[in-house]
Structures are given as C-alpha cells and as structure tokens.
Image: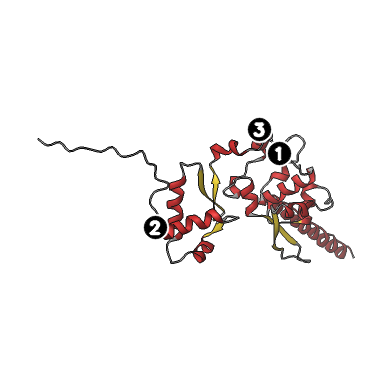
Amino acid sequence: MIKKKISKKDNIITFPAKLSSVEKEIEAIIFAAAEPLDIETIENKISKKIDVEKVLLKLQNEYKERGINLVCISKKWSFRTSSNLSSLMIQEKTVEKKLSKAAIETLAIIVYHQPVTRAEIEEIRGVAFGTNTIEILMELNWVKPGGRKDVPGKPILYVTTDDFLSHFNLQKLSDLPTVDELGAAGLIDSANIDNAIFGTGKFYKEKQDEKKEDIYSNIDEMLSSTLDKEEDK
C-alpha cells in the first residue's frame, strides 16, 4: 500500500480573505479617506458598478475580529480602532479643554429636543445665552443649523451633526442615555441639573400646548365677561 506524503503547509495568515479588484478599491478608498464616506460617494470613486453595500457588509465581517474594524455611523463608513484596543491609543500627554456649564447645557438641550430654536433653548434653560455659546458648539462641528421654523420671524432651528455621533461613538440618537443613566454613571450631578434639559422633543411641544390652552381659556373668559356686560345693559 502506497502512502501519500502529506506536506504540512506553512502557518500563513490570510489578510483579509481573497477580495476582487473592485472590493480592494472600496477597501482602499475608505482607508485613505479623511472622513467617513457614504455609499454614493464610494460608488462615484470605483471603476465599475457593483453592490457597494453588499461589499461593505462583507468587509465589515472580515474586519470584525481584527484590531481595525469597519464601522457604519449615520450611514457613513470608516475604519476605526477596535473598541477593546482603544486604551492602546491613549497618549501619555493630553491637553483637555472643558466646555462651560452653559455650553454643556445648551448642547444637551439641542441633543434631546432637536430641532430647537435659540428662544426655545433659552426658555428651557431659564436664562439668556452667553456670548458665543452656540458658536463654540458649531466650531466643534457638533451642532449645525437645521432649517428655519415656520413661525413669524423664521428663527433658525439647531440640530446635532454626524460628527457629534462619531465623537461620542453613537450609532443613532436613540442610543443616548437618559438623565438617570448619566447621573448613575457619575457623568453629571443630577441634583444640580434641571431634568427638563434632558427631556424629549415632546417637552417643548407640551409647553406650547399648555400655552395654547391658556390662550383659549383667556379668550373664553373675555367672551363670557363681554356677554355678561351686554346682558346687564
């Protein structure tokens, strides 16, 4: 009986699994990009038509157990250091610049009540804006104008940006913690912060509904008093 000699293969790791030329293009485009890319941008850069979303999901699966992961935040794709290795990326020397309490409260209101106007933010906070409060948040590219409200004066509405989600490693706004969760984690002093700041978009709508009810009740009172006077004559 003739025995076949089985040669032991070298211990070679494939990195990653075999990709087509277009798949390699997509991989390279995302790797070289200075910012996350949406599918349309990627489609415009590759050499031929292909199901880009399918390729992205394939690449995401290929990289999920590696030190670099392919992630999608707000429908935009980018390579990121694996979250369980993030501690290796921390520098020994860091320079921190803290936001003022006013800026933090303003950001929280925009995050939890967006879209929201400057006047609505001031009403929720109970105080007028300080100098450049919103401008600072816009310089960080965490906040941007999101159109105008359809009321007299057409005030600007403010919303958060994709950079805000990316900076705080959020997939979507619904991933945001509640005020109780923030307090339990020690991120805020819930005793000194008005819970209304961390409400939902319904908070301001409810306030507006209350105002409307007050207006209607005032009108009813005015009409009733007028009719009473006419009957007395």
Mark 1 → mark 3, Cα distance in angstroms: 26 Å
* Residue 58 screen position, x and y as percent: 42, 52
Which residue lies at the image location 46% right of the left edge and 46% below the top edge?
63
The kind of residue tagged 3 is Ala
Q: Nearer the viewer, mark 2 or mark 3?
A: 2
Lower position in the chain sequence, tag 2 or tag 3? 2
Question: What is the tally of numbered marks visible in this picture?
Answer: 3
Mark 2 → mark 3, Cα distance in angstroms: 49 Å
**Marking on residue 20:** 2
The kind of residue tagged 2 is Ser
Which residue lies at the image location 81% right of the left edge and 60% below the top edge?
224
Which residue lies at the image location 74% right of the left edge and 52% below the top edge?
137
Lower position in the chain sequence, tag 1 or tag 2? 2
Which residue carries the number 3 mark?
184
* Residue 10 screen position, x and y as percent: 34, 39
Secondary structure under the numbered disc 1 in the rendered image: loop
* Residue 43 screen position, x and y as percent: 49, 64
Lower position in the chain sequence, tag 1 or tag 3? 1
Mark 3 residue crowding within 10 angstroms, few (<14) / some (14–19) / many (20+): few
Mark 2 residue crowding within 10 angstroms, few (<14) / some (14–19) / many (20+): few
Above or below, comparing residue 68 to residue 233 in the picture: above
Which residue carries the number 1 mark?
94
Secondary structure under the numbered disc 2 in the rendered image: loop
Above or below, comparing residue 189 to residue 229 in the picture: above
Residue extending farthest left: 1
Q: Is residue 135 left or right of residue 65?
A: right
Mark 1 → mark 2, Cα distance in angstroms: 41 Å
